[in-house]
């Protein structure tokens, strides 16, 4: 009993403190902060695992894809008869790049291509654009033999574009071509700064345009150039343009038009210009001095008839056996049946005071032409010095001799002067070209006051 008379209450037992691990607690009683941290940890671990897997896959792809591209490109080249070596492959966003490539066609001898880099732009699994940087094309052999092998290769099943690895366009930038033996031993061409663009439309043969500047031609006794050369080819038709003065490309030029079979037309325009500006060393002609050249020529094969005309001159020529400079002036025409030799008609050549008719033939070929010409100057009586004639007539046989006679004070002249010459020129074999000149002088000079 309590003091106030109420019933006495027993004290209740105290609850024992129990430490229950968080892992054993019901999910409803878990601490919110601990629950949030655990979820984040799981997400992080999943992301890390995915990144690791992706990294492994990408690493494998970086190894596998370049290897696959390398193998596919080399195999595709082999199917087209091309032996290709590649040092390495680099994947790009738009395709891939091949480094350190070298290529040669089994069916085309003496042709080798090397380039430090080739970029390939892809559209899905099909190459769209191939770009070669700093390529070097080395060719060894005569023009007719090399081009014949190239034509046969392009017409063959292996050389015909097609397949999954055939590009739609090709670009060559900042490249170089070196062709040895182009027109005989010791004759070659060096073309630097080459830029070429080629496309394969629906036809088997590509349409392309190439520009190279400078271009030099090496011959046995010197070098011609530098010139600028532009070449275009489309649907079997070709156009070649040579600018002899690259600084003023429209001043002196040569244009050749043709097709897969032969040259259709040729036009040459050279206004009177110093030889040095035209890339022609006077020493190649066996002459010295400040020579100037003027020339025009036209050749056309139209139907069953072929015609050609030319005129020009070399002015101020000096030679060891000449007392003073002389001029060489020529004009002429030729005609004949298509595919045959052209007979030179109405040809005239004046070498200083000597003038005469030119006879011979011009034989065109698919890959060039050959000239066989003969010239003879009729005897000039030395006594003709006395009569003054018009100096503006370049074919006056006595003008130069009269001028010489006045300079040395000749009063009486007896005897004659004549000459003969021949020219054999083959554009397919420049080393075999030859020129002969044989003067015949029987003049006797008597000075004033001589007995």
Image (cartoon, rainbow, N blue to C red):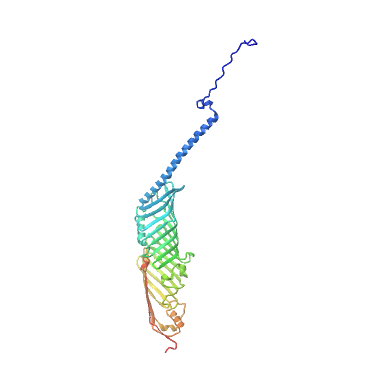
**In the image, is residue 445 above or below residue 23?**
below
Quadrant in the picture for residue 297: bottom left
Give the image location of residue 192, x and y in percent. Answer: 44, 60
**Which quadrant, please, contains the C terminus?**
bottom left
Please report the residue visible at 40 percent of the width from the left and 46 percent of the height from the top: 67
Give the image location of residue 14, x and y in percent. Answer: 57, 18
Question: Left of 184 or right of it: where is 38?
Answer: right
**In the image, is residue 408 above or below residue 106?**
below
Give the image location of residue 71, x and y in percent. Answer: 38, 48
Q: Is residue 359 visible?
A: no
**In the image, is residue 306 above or below residue 61?**
below
**Which quadrant, please, contains the N terminus?**
top right
Question: Left of 228 or right of it: where is 155?
Answer: left
Q: Residue furthest bottom?
A: 451
Give the image location of residue 54, x and y in percent. Answer: 45, 40
Badge count: 0
Quadrant in the picture for residue 418: bottom left
Which of 147/432 is in front? 432
Which of 402/358 is in front? 402
Q: Is residue 63 visible?
A: yes
Q: Residue furthest right?
A: 4
């Amino acid at each position: 009993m309590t003091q106030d008379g109420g019933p006495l209450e027993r004290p209740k037992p105290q609850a024992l403190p129990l430490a229950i691990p968080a892992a054993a607690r019901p999910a409803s009683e878990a601490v919110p902060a601990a629950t949030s941290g655990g979820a984040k940890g799981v997400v992080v671990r999943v992301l890390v695992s995915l990144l690791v897997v992706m990294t492994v896959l990408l690493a494998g792809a970086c190894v596998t894809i370049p290897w696959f591209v390398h193998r596919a490109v080399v195999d595709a080249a082999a199917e087209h008869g091309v032996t290709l070596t590649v040092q390495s492959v680099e994947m790009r966003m738009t395709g891939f790049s091949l480094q350190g490539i070298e290529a040669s066609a089994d069916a085309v001898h003496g042709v080798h291509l090397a380039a430090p880099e080739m970029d390939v732009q892809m559209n899905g699994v099909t190459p769209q654009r191939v770009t070669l940087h700093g390529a070097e094309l080395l060719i060894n052999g005569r023009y007719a033999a090399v081009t014949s092998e190239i034509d046969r290769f392009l017409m063959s099943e292996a050389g015909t574009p097609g397949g999954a690895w055939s590009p739609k366009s090709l670009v060559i930038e900042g490249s170089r071509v070196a062709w040895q033996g182009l027109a005989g031993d010791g004759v070659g061409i060096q073309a630097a700064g080459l830029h070429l663009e080629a496309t394969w439309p629906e036809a088997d043969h590509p349409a392309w345009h190439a520009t190279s500047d400078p271009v030099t031609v090496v011959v046995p006794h010197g070098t011609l150039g530098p010139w600028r050369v532009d070449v275009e080819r489309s649907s079997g038709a070709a156009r070649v343009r040579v600018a002899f003065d690259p600084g003023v490309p429209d001043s002196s030029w040569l244009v050749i038009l043709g097709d897969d079979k032969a040259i259709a037309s040729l036009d040459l325009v050279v206004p009177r210009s110093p030889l040095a500006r035209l890339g022609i060393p006077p020493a190649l002609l066996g002459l010295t001095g400040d020579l100037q050249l003027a020339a025009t020529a036209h050749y056309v094969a139209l139907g069953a008839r072929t015609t050609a005309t030319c005129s020009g001159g070399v002015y101020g020529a000096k030679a060891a056996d000449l007392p003073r400079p002389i001029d060489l002036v020529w004009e002429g025409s030729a005609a004949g049946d298509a595919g045959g030799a052209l007979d030179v008609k109405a040809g005239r050549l004046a070498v200083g005071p000597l003038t005469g008719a030119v006879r011979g033939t011009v034989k065109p070929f698919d890959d060039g032409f050959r000239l066989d010409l003969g010239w003879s100057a009729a005897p000039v009586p030395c006594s003709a010095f006395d009569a003054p004639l018009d100096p503006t007539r370049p074919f006056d046989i006595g003008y130069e001799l009269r001028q010489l006679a006045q300079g040395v004070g000749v009063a009486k002249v007896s005897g004659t002067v004549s000459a003969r010459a021949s020219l054999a020129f083959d554009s397919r074999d420049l080393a075999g070209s030859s020129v002969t000149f044989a003067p015949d002088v029987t003049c006797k000079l008597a000075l004033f006051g001589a007995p």
